[in-house]
Image: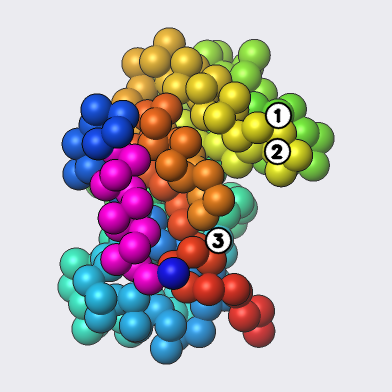
C-alpha cells in the first residue's frame, strides 16, 4: 500500500467522523526499516516519523535531517532513564512516559535544555503485566504528579491495545481518560486499526507496515 493511499484513508476516516483531516498526524513508523525505504517515503513528502530505539535513531536520522530540514521525530518505544539526554537531543515528541523515575529525569534534563518535546503518557489500558504503561486507576495521580511535582508539559496519552481485544474499546477508554485530565493529544491507532482510532479522536496515528511493507530486522 502506498503512502498516498494511507493519507487518503486517513482523510476519509476523519471526514466521516466530522473531523478535519489536518487534525490527525500520520507518524510513519520507520523502526528497523532500511534507509532506502525511509528515503523513498521522505521523497514522497512524508516528514513525521516514529522510532522505537534511541540508538537506532541516532544512527539514521542526523544524515536524513541534513537533507530534509523539516523532519519531525517521535519516540514511540520504551525510554530508559540513561537515554533521556540523547532522546531529548533527537526527538520532537516522546510517547512513552510511564513512571515517576523517568518523569523526574525528563524534568531535570528539560530544565537544563530550556525546551521540551511533546510528552505523551503511555497508558496500559489492558492492564497487561508484560506491557509498559500507567494503569488507568493510577493515571490521574500520575498526570498530577508530572504537572505539579515535575513541571512537565503533558500533551496527551498513548495506548497500544492488547492484540486479542477489540481496539476501539481501548481507544474509547483512552479518550475518556484524556478528557478527564484536560489533555488534547491521543496517540492511538496503528496499521490495522487507525481508522477506528480516528473515529474515536486520535490526534496521532502510528503506521508502519502499511506504509513501508513488512519490517526487515537487521
- Bounds of the magenta segment: 2-14
- What is the spatial separation of the Cα atoms under label 1 and label 3, in whole angstroms? 21 Å
Disc nearer the start of the sequence (3/2) = 3
Circle 3 is placed at which residue position? 52
* Residue depicted at x 34% and y 67%: 3
- Decide if residue 66 is on the left or right side of residue 185: left
Q: In what element is the residue under mark 3?
A: loop
* Residue depicted at x 55% and y 14%: 141
Circle 2 is placed at which residue position? 162
Residue 112 in view of the camera = no
Queried whether the magenta region covers residue 65, the answer comes back as: no
- What is the spatial separation of the Cα atoms under label 2 and label 1, in whole angstroms? 6 Å
Disc nearer the start of the sequence (2/1) = 1
Circle 1 is placed at which residue position? 126
Magenta-drawn stretch, dominant element (helix, strand or loop) = helix
- Decide if residue 124 is on the left or right side of residue 57: right
- For mark 3, does the 10 Å Cα neighbourhood hold few (<14), some (14 to 19), or many (20 or more) residues? some
Amino acid at each position: 500500500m502506498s503512502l498516498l493511499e494511507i493519507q487518503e484513508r486517513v482523510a476519509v476516516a476523519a471526514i466521516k467522523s466530522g473531523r478535519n483531516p489536518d487534525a490527525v498526524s500520520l507518524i510513519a513508523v520507520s523502526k528497523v526499516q532500511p534507509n532506502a525505504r525511509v528515503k523513498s517515503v521522505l521523497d514522497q513528502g512524508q516528514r513525521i516519523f516514529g522510532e522505537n530505539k534511541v540508538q537506532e535513531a541516532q544512527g539514521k536520522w542526523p544524515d536524513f535531517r541534513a537533507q530534509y530540514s523539516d523532519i519531525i521525530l517521535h519516540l514511540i518505544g520504551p525510554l530508559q532513564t540513561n537515554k533521556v539526554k540523547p532522546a531529548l537531543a533527537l526527538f520532537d515528541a516522546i510517547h512513552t512516559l510511564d513512571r515517576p523515575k523517568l518523569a523526574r529525569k525528563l524534568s531535570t534534563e528539560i530544565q537544563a535544555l530550556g525546551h521540551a518535546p511533546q510528552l505523551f503518557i503511555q497508558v496500559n489500558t489492558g492492564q497487561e503485566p508484560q506491557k509498559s504503561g500507567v494503569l488507568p486507576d493510577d493515571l490521574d495521580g500520575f498526570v498530577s504528579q508530572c504537572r505539579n511535582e515535575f513541571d512537565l508539559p503533558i500533551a496527551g496519552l498513548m495506548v497500544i491495545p492488547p492484540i486479542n481485544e477489540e481496539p476501539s474499546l481501548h481507544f474509547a477508554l483512552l479518550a475518556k481518560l484524556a478528557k478527564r485530565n484536560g489533555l488534547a493529544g491521543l496517540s492511538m491507532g496503528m496499521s490495522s486499526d487507525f481508522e477506528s482510532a480516528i473515529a474515536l479522536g486520535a490526534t496521532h496515528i502510528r503506521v508502519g507496515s502499511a506504509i513501508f511493507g513488512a519490517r526487515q530486522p537487521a
